[in-house]
Image (cartoon, rainbow, N blue to C red):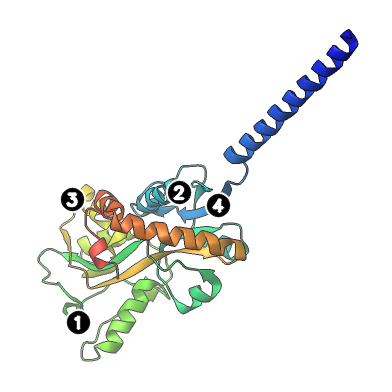
């Protein structure tokens, strides 16, 4: 009898142990497995839009917005890394990164190469930076003025060229450059009179440079605005990711989160310019 009782008890203990193992396995599955890690490349040197080199946690408007998105999508774990602009799109195209953010405009070329959510992350406001007494307030005021060279093929250069095409009665002296001179140095060149004006998106932190250096420079009202988007590596798996993010971006715009972040990082409301 005792042997039978022992055997029954043993079977019962094994059954309990097996059940606990299954329960623990299920718990492990719900807490760890099934959460997909998303590799994200952020701009490394575009304060306050985003900054933070490799090994440093990215900071700024876009990283904080990404954290807000991730908080609403617990099925993903966002891992951000600050990298150079060139490395961003290259890494995204090869699949090293799932997402790249860097104040990107939507274009037909990018739409073919990447998945771009319908809802934007923000808006890039193009402004003119000039001396306070210059009288420069809009694009036509740049006729006869020395304009800081713009990056060849960049968004600013394309904007100026398109504006010139649409307003042929105003002839601007525009020079394309690939020198890559940082915009704080360009602001210094406006301050010392080498150039009369600098045309740039305002989300790169120009106002902070002007304030810190106490420059005698002011920014115009926006002369152009364009939505900015995240770019997502094109794959079947990422179609679901893009749909999830697209829904959350609308929620964060509607509930005022994007407005709060733009006020915090840019000191202005960019939501009213988002189309």
Q: CA distance from mark 4 to mark 2?
A: 12 Å
The nearer-to-camera label among 2 and 1 is 2
The nearer-to-camera label among 4 and 2 is 2
Q: CA distance from mark 2 to mark 1?
A: 46 Å
Q: Would residue 64 appear left or right of 111 to someone viewing this image?
A: left
The nearer-to-camera label among 4 and 1 is 4
At which x and y percent is residue 134? 12, 69
Which residue is under mark 2?
Answer: 70
Image quadrant assignment for residue 3? top right
Which residue is under mark 4?
Answer: 39
Q: Which of disc 2 and disc 3 is earlier in sequence?
A: 2
Q: Which of disc 2 and disc 4 is earlier in sequence?
A: 4
Q: CA distance from mark 4 to mark 3?
A: 39 Å
Q: CA distance from mark 3 to mark 2?
A: 38 Å
Q: Nearer the viewer, residue 142 or 78?
A: 78
What's the residue at 57%, 48% (across, down)?
Answer: 37
Mark yes or no: residue 175 visible. Answer: no
Indicate whether 238 appears above or below 158. Answer: above
Disc sitting over residue 143 in the figure: 1
Q: Are marks 3 and 1 in contact (CB under 8 Å)?
A: no
Q: CA distance from mark 3 to mark 1?
A: 27 Å
Q: Which of disc 3 and disc 4 is earlier in sequence?
A: 4
Mark yes or no: residue 191 visible. Answer: yes
């Amino acid at each position: 009898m005792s042997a039978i009782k022992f055997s029954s008890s043993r079977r019962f203990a094994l059954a309990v142990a097996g059940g606990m193992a299954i329960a623990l396995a299920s718990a492990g599955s719900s807490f760890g497995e099934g959460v997909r890690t998303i590799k994200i490349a952020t701009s490394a040197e575009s304060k306050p839009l985003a900054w933070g080199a490799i090994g440093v946690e990215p900071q700024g408007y876009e990283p904080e917005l990404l954290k807000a998105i991730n908080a609403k999508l617990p099925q993903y774990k966002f891992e951000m890394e600050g990298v150079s602009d060139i490395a961003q799109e290259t890494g995204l195209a090869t699949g090293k990164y799932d997402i790249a953010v860097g104040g990107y405009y939507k274009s037909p070329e990018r739409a073919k190469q990447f998945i771009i959510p319908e809802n934007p992350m923000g808006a890039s406001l193009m402004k003119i930076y000039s001396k306070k007494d210059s009288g420069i307030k809009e694009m036509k005021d740049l006729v006869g003025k020395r304009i800081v060279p713009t990056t060849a093929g960049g968004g600013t250069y394309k904007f100026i060229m398109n504006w010139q095409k649409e307003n042929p009665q105003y002839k601007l002296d525009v020079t394309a450059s690939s020198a890559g001179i940082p915009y704080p140095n360009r602001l210094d060149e406006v301050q010392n009179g080498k150039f009369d004006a600098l045309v740039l998106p305002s989300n790169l932190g120009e106002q902070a440079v002007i304030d810190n250096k106490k420059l005698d420079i002011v920014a115009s009202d926006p002369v152009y605005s364009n939505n900015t988007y995240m770019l997502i590596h094109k794959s079947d798996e990422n179609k679901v990711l893009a749909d999830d993010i697209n829904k959350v971006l609308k929620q964060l715009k509607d509930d005022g989160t994007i407005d709060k972040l733009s006020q915090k990082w840019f000191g202005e409301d960019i939501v009213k310019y988002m189309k």
